[in-house]
Image: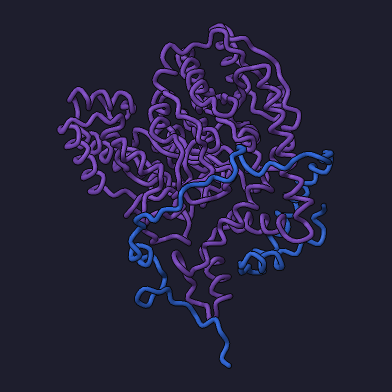
Chain colours: A blue, B purple
């Protein structure tokens, strides 16, 4: 566990986030400090300790799968940055053959 | 009666007795907002016609015999909770122009109880921050001193209530975002047990921590809102199935006498402002005078809580905020020529600095090779923190602590992210353990800045917690 070699541009690409050079430099320093602070967790022995994933223990919340009236599709599509009829419009994903 | 003096309870009673109508109350609210919000800057948007129409409907319901508990009560809503037909920006440019297609469950429940959604209030972008300075749209001011922050992230909610331009508000709390602004603004802020209130329709920040709660002038008002908000929701599989308590009867005859109140020694350490320590100590003495038994306890893993939180919360945030990609809603970059640059540029242009910082931090701690060292370890330490509380609650009924190490700080005072994060030192542990906690006003500094104390209770002891807080409030009056 170390903040050495923290490549902020690599992580930003994983997060689908474009960063300018200034931004990357600033974040690199700040996140380095924050990760250094996190290192105090290494002081603890957590061998055999169960992880806590949630605020309480409820799991597998089952219910009957019944069709219900859903929200009008048009209300959702109204928020689309670009649409064609009932579809979201995007730049082409598939390359030309 | 001046508008600023209305509470949920007093307004509900006045409306029941026909002394005031909901339309009159909402019109008075709008007048106060228009007079005060130029200074305070709590509201992002306010649909005045819509609020008056909803109030008018509430008045008609009453005329037809409806006796719903919150009938006609205006509630300010933090701008990450969806209200059908209203904007929901999360104080982010990436959601500018977004209109909610549906009601969050908390909104549906409030509306069913008769409440009027009146105005959307400012916050730190996507609830990431402790001062409301991270809003993309405006900087909300503390009504007690306009040069200072109201706290955050529910700073707009706290400032609107404290500034006399809202009767009550909804906030959300992930690591202290209800309790810290409540303390800074001198109001009551209640974070319920994780799972008591549905998160459906509440824009997710950190799903294992987020909880909606009331921000009000009195504990009784928080109890009235909690009564409407609590309950299982088929739309949120993490909501608890336990029966919802009857808060009104829990609050009746509330007393501190005989309660065992624990003081965790790790919360009373150097680094807290002397005036805050003094006010908290005076509050402890009052509790003792009122018959509470004060017990020293220890929560030995407290010092690790902040490191755990700033791994777990950004990790969950990085996953939750992946949905903002410019495809189905929100900002889309005009400078993109393929899908990948559309994602990356839309997010770069839409998100603010703190949000980007946390997305990168969260992505890093979840990335291959680092997952076990950071996220896996943090989840295990989270268990140790939870066990500390379990052990303490074997000895005491409630814990009493400071809410934040300082009173409200100046706008622009905290520039370094880590020192801003330290604000949440005393509120984060209860969040990690999923426990109910409340900030109640306890006094003010010589400069007139409010300071609250925090009571923390065992899981699902929400009603006893509010009863304790109510008794404390009576003691301080």
Q: Quadrant of residue B238?
A: top right
> Viewer-proximal residue, B416 or B305?
B305
Q: Is B134 in front, or is B425?
A: B425
Left or right: A26 as drawn, with respect to B7: right
Q: Judge by depth and name the residue closer to the eye, B231 or A30.
A: B231
Up-down: is B414 above or below B425? below
Return the x and y of residue B202 as percentages of the image width and height: 46, 48
Tell me what residue is drawn at x 23 percent, y 24 percent.
B14
User: Where does residue B287 sit, x and y in percent of width and height?
Assistant: 56, 12
Q: Is residue B197 above or below residue B235?
A: above
Q: Is residue B449 visible?
A: yes
x, y percentage for residue B288? 59, 9
Horizontally, is A28 left or right of B159 in the view? right
For this view, does B161 lie left or right of residue B476?
Answer: left
Any part of residue B139 in sight: no
**Quarter holding residue B273:** top right
């Amino acid at each position: 566990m170390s903040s050495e070699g923290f490549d902020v541009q690599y992580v930003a690409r994983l997060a689908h986030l474009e960063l300018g050079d200034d931004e990357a430099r600033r974040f690199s320093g700040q996140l380095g400090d924050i990760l250094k602070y996190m290192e105090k967790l290494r002081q603890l022995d957590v061998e055999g300790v169960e992880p806590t994933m949630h605020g309480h223990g409820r799991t597998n919340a089952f219910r009957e799968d019944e069709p219900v009236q859903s929200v009008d599709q048009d209300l959702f599509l109204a928020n689309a940055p670009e649409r064609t009829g009932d579809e979201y419009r995007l730049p082409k994903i598939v390359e030309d053959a | 009666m001046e508008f600023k003096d209305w509470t949920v309870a007093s307004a509900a009673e006045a409306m029941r007795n026909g002394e005031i109508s909901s339309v009159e109350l909402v019109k008075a609210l709008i007048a106060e907002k228009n007079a005060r919000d130029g200074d305070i800057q709590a509201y992002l948007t306010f649909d005045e016609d819509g609020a008056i129409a909803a109030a008018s409907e509430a008045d008609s319901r009453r005329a037809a015999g409806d006796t719903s508990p919150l009938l006609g009560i205006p509630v300010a809503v933090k701008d990450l909770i969806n209200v059908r037909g209203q904007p929901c920006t999360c104080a982010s440019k990436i959601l500018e122009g977004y209109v909610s297609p549906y009601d969050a469950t908390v909104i549906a429940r409030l509306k069913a109880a008769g409440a009027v959604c009146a105005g959307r209030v400012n916050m730190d972008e996507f609830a990431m921050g402790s001062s409301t300075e991270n809003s993309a749209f405006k900087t909300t001011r503390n009504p007690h001193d306009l040069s200072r922050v109201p706290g955050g992230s529910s700073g707009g909610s706290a400032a609107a209530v404290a500034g006399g331009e809202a009767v009550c508000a909804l906030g959300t709390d992930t690591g202290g975002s209800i309790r810290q602004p409540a303390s800074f603004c001198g109001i009551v802020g209640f974070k319920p047990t994780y799972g008591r209130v549905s998160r459906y329709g509440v824009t997710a920040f950190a799903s294992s921590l987020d909880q909606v709660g009331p921000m009000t002038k009195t504990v009784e008002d928080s109890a009235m809102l909690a009564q409407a908000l609590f309950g299982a929701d088929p739309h949120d599989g993490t909501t608890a199935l336990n029966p919802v308590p009857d808060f009104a009867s829990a609050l009746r005859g509330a007393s501190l006498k005989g309660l065992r109140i624990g003081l965790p020694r790790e919360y009373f350490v150097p680094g807290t402002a002397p005036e805050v320590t003094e006010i908290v100590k005076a509050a402890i003495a009052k509790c003792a005078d009122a018959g509470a038994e004060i017990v020293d306890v220890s929560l030995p893993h407290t010092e690790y809580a902040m490191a755990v939180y700033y791994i777990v919360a950004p990790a969950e945030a990085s996953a939750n905020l992946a949905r903002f990609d410019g495809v189905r809603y929100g900002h889309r970059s005009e400078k993109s020529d393929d899908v990948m640059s559309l994602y990356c540029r839309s997010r770069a242009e839409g998100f603010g600095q703190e949000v980007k910082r946390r997305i990168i931090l969260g992505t890093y701690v979840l990335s291959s090779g680092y997952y076990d060292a950071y996220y896996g370890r943090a989840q295990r330490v989270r268990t140790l923190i939870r066990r500390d509380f379990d052990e303490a609650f074997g000895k005491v009924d409630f814990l009493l602590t400071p809410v934040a190490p300082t009173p409200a700080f100046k706008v622009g005072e905290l520039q370094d992210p880590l020192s801003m994060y330290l604000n949440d030192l005393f509120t984060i542990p209860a969040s990690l353990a999923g426990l109910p906690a409340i900030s109640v006003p306890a006094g003010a500094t010589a400069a007139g800045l409010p300071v609250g104390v925090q009571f923390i209770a065992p899981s699902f002891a929400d009603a006893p917690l509010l009863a304790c807080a109510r008794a404390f409030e009576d003691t301080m009056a």
